Amino acid sequence: GQQVMQIPQYQHVQEGEDFTTYCNSSTTLSNIQWYKQRPGGHPVFLIQLVKSGEVKKQKRLTFQFGEAKKNSSLHITATQTTDVGTYFCAEGFLEYGNKLVFGAGTILRVKS
Amino acid sequence: KAGVTQTPRYLIKTRGQQVTLSCSPISGHRSVSWYQQTPGQGLQFLFEYFSETQRNKGNFPGRFSGRQFSNSRSEMNVSTLELGDSALYLCASSLRSAGYEQYFGPGTRLTVT
Protein backbone atom coordinates (compact mmCIF):
# COMPACT_ATOMS: atom_id res chain seq x y z
CA GLY A 1 0.00 0.00 0.00
CA GLN A 2 0.91 3.64 0.08
CA GLN A 3 3.85 4.26 2.34
CA VAL A 4 6.09 7.18 3.09
CA MET A 5 9.33 6.44 4.94
CA GLN A 6 10.75 9.16 7.13
CA ILE A 7 14.19 9.27 8.77
CA PRO A 8 15.65 9.72 11.27
CA GLN A 9 13.19 8.77 13.97
CA TYR A 10 14.85 11.00 16.54
CA GLN A 11 17.38 13.80 16.44
CA HIS A 12 18.94 15.57 19.39
CA VAL A 13 20.91 18.69 18.47
CA GLN A 14 22.66 21.45 20.30
CA GLU A 15 21.00 24.82 19.89
CA GLY A 16 22.52 26.50 16.87
CA GLU A 17 23.20 23.26 15.00
CA ASP A 18 21.42 22.36 11.79
CA PHE A 19 18.76 19.66 11.44
CA THR A 20 17.47 17.69 8.48
CA THR A 21 14.68 15.15 8.14
CA TYR A 22 14.11 13.06 5.02
CA CYS A 23 11.04 11.57 3.47
CA ASN A 24 11.23 8.79 0.86
CA SER A 25 8.78 6.83 -1.24
CA SER A 26 9.18 3.95 -3.67
CA THR A 27 6.55 5.53 -5.90
CA THR A 28 6.16 8.96 -7.41
CA LEU A 29 4.55 11.37 -4.99
CA SER A 30 1.67 13.57 -6.12
CA ASN A 31 2.54 16.21 -3.60
CA ILE A 32 4.22 16.45 -0.24
CA GLN A 33 3.03 18.40 2.74
CA TRP A 34 5.06 19.07 5.88
CA TYR A 35 3.57 19.49 9.33
CA LYS A 36 4.98 20.27 12.77
CA GLN A 37 3.49 18.97 15.99
CA ARG A 38 4.67 20.47 19.25
CA PRO A 39 4.65 18.23 22.34
CA GLY A 40 1.06 17.92 23.51
CA GLY A 41 -0.21 19.77 20.46
CA HIS A 42 -1.69 19.02 17.08
CA PRO A 43 -0.11 19.00 13.62
CA VAL A 44 0.30 22.43 12.07
CA PHE A 45 0.75 22.85 8.33
CA LEU A 46 4.14 24.20 7.25
CA ILE A 47 4.37 23.89 3.47
CA GLN A 48 3.23 22.01 0.39
CA LEU A 49 5.52 20.95 -2.46
CA VAL A 50 4.08 19.98 -5.81
CA LYS A 51 6.65 20.46 -8.54
CA SER A 52 9.66 18.31 -9.32
CA GLY A 53 12.84 19.85 -7.88
CA GLU A 54 10.88 22.50 -6.00
CA VAL A 55 12.65 24.36 -3.21
CA LYS A 56 10.81 26.61 -0.77
CA LYS A 57 12.14 28.59 2.16
CA GLN A 58 10.50 29.88 5.29
CA LYS A 59 13.01 31.86 7.33
CA ARG A 60 15.38 29.18 8.70
CA LEU A 61 13.42 26.29 7.14
CA THR A 62 14.21 24.96 3.66
CA PHE A 63 11.99 22.40 1.98
CA GLN A 64 12.97 20.41 -1.09
CA PHE A 65 11.14 18.06 -3.43
CA GLY A 66 13.29 15.61 -5.36
CA GLU A 67 13.65 15.74 -9.11
CA ALA A 68 11.97 12.36 -9.45
CA LYS A 69 9.29 13.33 -6.91
CA LYS A 70 10.17 10.34 -4.77
CA ASN A 71 11.77 12.14 -1.88
CA SER A 72 11.63 15.34 0.08
CA SER A 73 13.58 16.97 2.86
CA LEU A 74 13.18 19.63 5.51
CA HIS A 75 16.30 21.43 6.68
CA ILE A 76 16.42 23.80 9.65
CA THR A 77 19.40 26.10 9.93
CA ALA A 78 20.69 27.10 13.37
CA THR A 79 18.03 25.37 15.43
CA GLN A 80 16.37 27.14 18.31
CA THR A 81 14.53 25.74 21.32
CA THR A 82 11.27 26.82 19.68
CA ASP A 83 11.94 24.28 16.90
CA VAL A 84 11.31 21.39 19.29
CA GLY A 85 8.59 19.02 18.14
CA THR A 86 7.81 16.26 15.67
CA TYR A 87 8.09 16.99 11.99
CA PHE A 88 5.91 14.96 9.67
CA CYS A 89 5.89 14.64 5.93
CA ALA A 90 2.64 13.56 4.36
CA GLU A 91 1.75 12.48 0.86
CA GLY A 92 -1.35 14.01 -0.60
CA PHE A 93 -3.37 12.31 -3.32
CA LEU A 94 -5.26 14.63 -5.59
CA GLU A 95 -7.40 11.80 -6.84
CA TYR A 96 -8.41 10.94 -3.29
CA GLY A 97 -9.55 14.32 -2.10
CA ASN A 98 -7.71 15.50 0.97
CA LYS A 99 -6.48 12.12 2.19
CA LEU A 100 -2.97 12.32 3.60
CA VAL A 101 -0.59 9.43 4.27
CA PHE A 102 1.83 10.49 6.96
CA GLY A 103 5.39 9.44 7.55
CA ALA A 104 6.31 8.27 11.03
CA GLY A 105 7.74 11.66 11.90
CA THR A 106 11.09 12.87 13.19
CA ILE A 107 11.24 13.98 16.81
CA LEU A 108 13.55 16.95 17.23
CA ARG A 109 15.01 17.81 20.62
CA VAL A 110 17.15 20.90 21.02
CA LYS A 111 19.62 21.26 23.88
CA SER A 112 20.30 24.80 24.99
CA LYS B 1 -11.42 33.23 12.20
CA ALA B 2 -11.97 30.45 14.74
CA GLY B 3 -9.97 27.29 14.29
CA VAL B 4 -11.12 23.69 14.19
CA THR B 5 -12.82 22.68 17.40
CA GLN B 6 -13.28 19.19 18.75
CA THR B 7 -15.39 17.93 21.60
CA PRO B 8 -14.92 16.41 24.01
CA ARG B 9 -11.21 16.92 24.57
CA TYR B 10 -10.84 13.91 26.84
CA LEU B 11 -12.89 10.78 27.18
CA ILE B 12 -12.62 7.59 29.19
CA LYS B 13 -14.69 4.59 28.12
CA THR B 14 -14.74 0.90 28.91
CA ARG B 15 -14.41 -1.95 26.46
CA GLY B 16 -17.56 -2.73 24.57
CA GLN B 17 -19.01 0.75 24.85
CA GLN B 18 -19.45 3.10 21.95
CA VAL B 19 -18.34 6.70 21.59
CA THR B 20 -19.17 9.70 19.42
CA LEU B 21 -16.68 12.47 18.78
CA SER B 22 -17.54 15.83 17.27
CA CYS B 23 -15.64 18.21 15.02
CA SER B 24 -16.52 21.72 13.87
CA PRO B 25 -14.39 22.84 10.92
CA ILE B 26 -13.19 26.32 10.14
CA SER B 27 -16.02 28.41 8.75
CA GLY B 28 -16.26 27.89 4.99
CA HIS B 29 -14.34 24.62 4.96
CA ARG B 30 -16.38 21.79 3.48
CA SER B 31 -13.79 19.04 3.73
CA VAL B 32 -13.35 17.27 7.07
CA SER B 33 -10.91 14.42 7.62
CA TRP B 34 -10.35 12.25 10.66
CA TYR B 35 -7.06 10.75 11.79
CA GLN B 36 -6.07 8.41 14.58
CA GLN B 37 -2.73 9.04 16.27
CA THR B 38 -1.04 6.43 18.44
CA PRO B 39 2.60 6.03 19.53
CA GLY B 40 2.85 2.71 17.72
CA GLN B 41 1.06 3.41 14.44
CA GLY B 42 1.54 7.15 14.13
CA LEU B 43 -0.98 9.25 12.25
CA GLN B 44 -3.43 7.14 10.29
CA PHE B 45 -6.19 8.34 8.01
CA LEU B 46 -9.67 7.24 9.00
CA PHE B 47 -12.00 8.92 6.51
CA GLU B 48 -12.83 12.17 4.76
CA TYR B 49 -16.12 13.90 4.18
CA PHE B 50 -16.88 16.58 1.66
CA SER B 51 -20.29 18.15 1.30
CA GLU B 52 -21.84 15.43 3.47
CA THR B 53 -20.39 12.59 1.37
CA GLN B 54 -17.70 10.20 2.47
CA ARG B 55 -15.05 10.35 -0.23
CA ASN B 56 -12.26 8.25 1.21
CA LYS B 57 -11.89 5.64 3.89
CA GLY B 58 -8.74 4.29 5.52
CA ASN B 59 -8.01 0.74 6.58
CA PHE B 60 -10.07 0.62 9.73
CA PRO B 61 -12.77 -1.87 10.71
CA GLY B 62 -16.42 -1.10 10.22
CA ARG B 63 -16.70 -0.21 13.91
CA PHE B 64 -15.37 3.18 12.88
CA SER B 65 -17.91 5.32 11.11
CA GLY B 66 -18.63 8.94 10.54
CA ARG B 67 -20.94 11.47 9.03
CA GLN B 68 -21.05 15.08 8.05
CA PHE B 69 -23.91 17.49 8.44
CA SER B 70 -25.11 20.22 6.11
CA ASN B 71 -23.22 22.83 8.17
CA SER B 72 -19.99 20.80 7.59
CA ARG B 73 -19.76 19.72 11.20
CA SER B 74 -18.71 16.11 11.44
CA GLU B 75 -19.00 13.28 13.90
CA MET B 76 -17.18 10.00 14.13
CA ASN B 77 -18.45 7.00 15.99
CA VAL B 78 -16.63 3.99 17.30
CA SER B 79 -18.73 1.07 18.40
CA THR B 80 -17.74 -1.90 20.57
CA LEU B 81 -14.62 -0.20 21.84
CA GLU B 82 -11.41 -2.18 22.21
CA LEU B 83 -8.35 -1.36 24.28
CA GLY B 84 -6.43 -0.72 21.07
CA ASP B 85 -8.78 2.13 20.19
CA SER B 86 -7.13 4.28 22.84
CA ALA B 87 -5.64 7.14 20.86
CA LEU B 88 -5.71 10.80 20.01
CA TYR B 89 -8.40 11.37 17.39
CA LEU B 90 -7.70 14.38 15.23
CA CYS B 91 -10.03 16.17 12.93
CA ALA B 92 -8.76 18.33 10.08
CA SER B 93 -10.59 20.69 7.78
CA SER B 94 -9.60 22.01 4.40
CA LEU B 95 -10.83 24.81 2.21
CA ARG B 96 -10.50 23.06 -1.11
CA SER B 97 -11.77 19.76 -2.36
CA ALA B 98 -8.41 18.10 -2.94
CA GLY B 99 -4.69 18.31 -2.31
CA TYR B 100 -4.83 21.35 -0.10
CA GLU B 101 -3.39 22.21 3.29
CA GLN B 102 -5.29 20.93 6.27
CA TYR B 103 -6.01 22.60 9.58
CA PHE B 104 -6.07 20.28 12.53
CA GLY B 105 -8.11 20.56 15.67
CA PRO B 106 -6.69 19.94 19.15
CA GLY B 107 -7.94 16.35 19.13
CA THR B 108 -9.94 14.13 21.44
CA ARG B 109 -7.90 11.91 23.74
CA LEU B 110 -9.81 8.64 24.07
CA THR B 111 -8.81 6.14 26.72
CA VAL B 112 -10.43 2.71 26.71
CA THR B 113 -10.14 0.69 29.91
Image (cartoon, coloured by chain):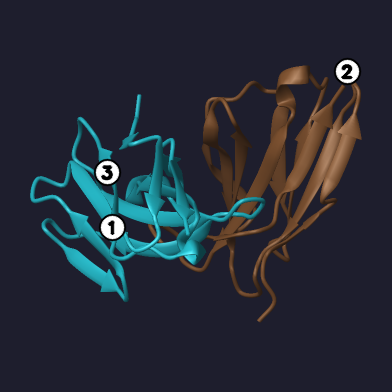
Chain colours: A cyan, B brown
Q: Is residue B92 above or below residue A105?
A: below
Identify the residue shown where x is 20% and y is 43%: A71
Question: Would residue A52 be found to the left or right of residue B87 on screen?
Answer: left
Q: Is any atom of residue A98 visible in this view?
A: no
- On residue A22, which mark appears? 3
Question: Would residue A104 be found to the left or right of residue A32 on screen?
Answer: right
How many numbered dots are placed on residues in this image?
3
Please state the horizontal and vertical placement of residue B90, each as a whole percent of the image.
65, 47
Q: Disc 2 to disc 1, how far (Cα)?
A: 48 Å
Q: Does the CB distance between marks 2 and 1 fall below 8 Å?
A: no
In the image, A5 versus B32, the foreground residue is A5
The amino acid pointed to by label 1 is: Asp
Identify the residue shown where x is 85% and y is 35%: B19
Q: Quadrant of the N terminus of chain A?
A: top left
Q: Disc 2 to disc 3, how far (Cα)?
A: 40 Å
The quarter of the displayed image where residue B47 is located: top right
* Residue at the farthest bottom position: B1
Mark 1 is surrounded, within 10 Å at the Cα level, by few (under 14), some (14 to 19) or many (20 or more) other residues, namely some
Please state the horizontal and vertical placement of residue A20, each as a whole percent of the image.
28, 50
| Residue bearing the label numbered 2 | B16
Please state the horizontal and vertical placement of residue B91, each as a whole percent of the image.
64, 51
- On residue A102, which mark appears? none
Secondary structure, mark 3, is: strand
Q: Are marks 2 and 3 on the same chain?
A: no
| Residue bearing the label numbered 1 | A18
Q: Is residue A58 above or below residue B59?
A: below
Q: Chain of mark 2?
A: B
The amino acid pointed to by label 2 is: Gly
Identify the residue shown where x is 11% and y is 58%: A53
Q: Is any atom of residue A3 visible in this view?
A: yes
Q: Chain of mark 3?
A: A
